Image: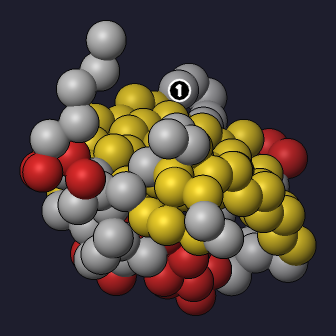
Amino acid sequence: MIKKTKGSLKWIKKENNLRNLGTHLIVEFWGGLDINDSKKFEKFLVEAARAAKATPLQVNTHEFSPQGITGVVLLSESHITFHSWPEFKYLALDIFTCGNKCQPYQALDYLKKKIKPKQVQVTEIKRGFV
């Protein structure tokens, strides 16, 4: 059984008389800059997290051979993950934040400016209705 505390209640967003714990953006980028440099992408992701008013805790990426990278930025408020297929000029992103202060769309806007995709698809999922 989950016990609600005063501390946990501050994380709950109220929208249309429903309460949810977080917002999860499933994002697809097609086209844009070459997305095969893990160090550059780590920097973009940390800056995107900060743009969302989130707190980056740790970054871990992996480069595949001959191309492609995957990684995660652990946030105090959840995570941002990605996987790239440079040969298809495709990047899959997940931006999941919880709490009242985080703005996941600000992270998305920051990444759009840096990567400059030609096409973007976003699916928003409200998580944890309580």
Residue at the (33%, 70%) spot, across then down: 100
* Image coords of residue 122 (percent x, y): 78, 63
What is the tally of numbered marks visible in this picture? Answer: 1
Residue 77 % position (x, y): 27, 52
Residue positioned 14% across, 41% down in the render: 5
User: Who's the residue at 60% across and 65% down the image?
Assistant: 17
Answer with the quarter of the image where residue 39 lies.
bottom left
- Residue 74, quarter of the rendered image: top left
Which residue in the rendered view is the most extreme toward the front?
17
Q: Position of residue 70 (x, y in %)?
A: 50, 35
The residue that label 1 is drawn on is 64
Instruction: Please say if 59 is above or below 117.
Output: above
Q: Is residue 72 depicted above or below 24 in this figure?
A: above
Of the 4 image quadrants, the one containing the N terminus is top left
Label 1 CA crowd tier, 10 Å (few <14, some 14–19, many 20+): few
Name the foreground residue: 110 vs 17.
17
In this view of the protein, which residue sits in the foreground, 40 or 18? 18
Residue type at mark 1 is Phe
